[in-house]
Amino acid sequence: MPSISKKGLSMPESPIRKLVPFAEAAAKKGKKIYQLNIGQPDIKTPDVAMQAVKDNSIEVLSYSHSAGFASYREKLAKYYERNDIHVSAEEIIVTTGGSEALLFAMGTITDPGDEVIIPEPFYANYNGFATSSGVTIVPIESSIENNFALPPISEFEKLITESTKAILLCNPGNPTGYLYTKEEVQQIADLALKHDLFVVADEVYREFTYDGVKHNSIMSIPELANNAIMVDSVSKRFSMCGARIGCLVSKNKEVITTAMKFAQARLSPPTLAQIASEAALDTPQEYFEEVNEEYTLRRNILVEGLEKIEGVNVAKPKGAFYCIAELPIESADDFAQWLLEDFEYEGETVMVAPAAGFYSTPNTGLNQVRIAYVLKRENLERALQILEVAIKEYTSK
Ligand SMILES: Cc1ncc(COP(=O)(O)O)c(C=O)c1O
């Protein structure tokens, strides 16, 4: 039989999805599962977006421009303007999800063997994108003790080698929920300028910030214009994960020209989903206010509930809709599987994502889980109740 590529064999499995077979088996047995493991919001997609697709009378579902509809990019530029990000339509390439923007960014700025420094824990799929591009991720550990704040810049500097091409920041962070301060973003910008590095900023959770704290975009630092690449997405902003629309944004012309070649190779982003995404930009401001209020309440329920469970330590998120919790156990992998296979409380259980998959340093975060607060408040309260019983039972085994 012909052999599979080394690259293919080294592609990491998604740590979030590897528990799925156990969840399916549990569901088959009739167990109800509260899914705290994935970032699929239950929030309704804005009506304007759905309506735009329904109202359409397209007769030929054709390709679009490789960079995406010009009308959509114009409107996106206006949206960014309102968010203190000054870019033109020509500085935006519409992609098939933020995922493709990340792949294009890696393809545009790295060669095999290059290194990208990323604070860990980080969004696990960065591993897959790095493997696809032959890039080595150099992790820098942030810690639950200080809510996963930016590690000291001196620690970043120690990791910079001849092969370093970029620093990747996820802001607000998945899985940490950490929202970088203006000073932290500026520190990263200064470091990138000093060492002539790119900064790739994954800002897909920009709107999800709590406690009145504002998001600080890497794109709002004028001196960094040639070094900054922003990755964005409609997936979470408008609860449109299935649309598969994102974008790559940069003021660096060479970055855009090069990324466009990747964009041309895959022809175009999805046409119907661009119609929905363009219309979604007309979503009334109240939608975001309501959604943020809902997530704030959910976050408070989750953090307060977790803090009440003996032995649990939780980092309070200021953004996105995830948190990392340290549990009084040794292996979150084993615990997460046990929750699905061997445990139930009144016919119900919970599904969590073991956090080790969000670290690339081996044997780190073994007793941590990532919890997504994407469930309705009453379900979140119930899930916390079940988790408390489960931890008691598991630790007294
Ligand atoms: C931090 C982060 N970046 C990028 C993505 C990819 O999003 P999409 O490809 O759905 O736009 C996700 C999805 O969960 C994410 O959490």
Image: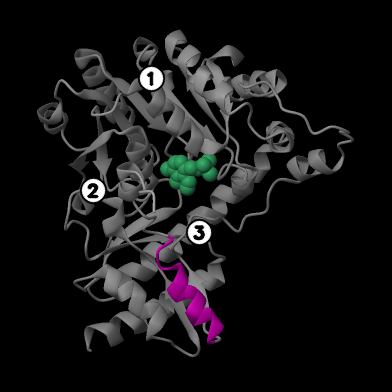
Q: Position of residue 397 (x, y in %)?
A: 23, 89
Q: Which residue is mark 3?
A: 297
Question: Which amino acid is tagged 3?
Answer: Leu
Q: In the displayed orientation, state which residue is furthest to the front.
A: 1
Q: Which residue is mark 1?
A: 228
Q: Position of residue 179 (x, y in %)?
A: 36, 40
What number is the disc on residue 88?
Answer: none
Q: Are marks 2 and 1 in contact (CB under 8 Å)?
A: no
Could you say which is closer to the camera, residue 332 or residue 392?
Answer: 332
Query: What residue is shown at x 68% (from left), y 49% (from top)?
Result: 45
Query: Which stretch appears magenta?
Result: 17-29
> In terms of secondary structure, what is the magenta stretch mainly?
helix
Q: Quadrant of the N terminus?
A: bottom left
Q: Position of residue 344 (x, y in %)?
A: 43, 87
| Quarter holding residue 310 | bottom left
Query: What residue is shown at x 35% (from left), y 49% (from top)?
Result: 3
**Residue 88 showing in the rendered view:** no
Query: What residue is shown at x 22% (from left), y 58% (from top)?
Result: 365
Whether residue 134 sits left or right of residue 93 in the image: it is left
Whether residue 309 sits left or right of residue 24 in the image: it is left
Q: Which residue is mark 2?
A: 360
Nearer the observer: mark 1 or 3; the answer is: 1
Establish whether ligand 1 lies closer than 8 Å to the Cβ of label 3: no
Local packing at callout 3 (Cα closer than 10 Å; few below 14, some 14-19, many 20+) is some
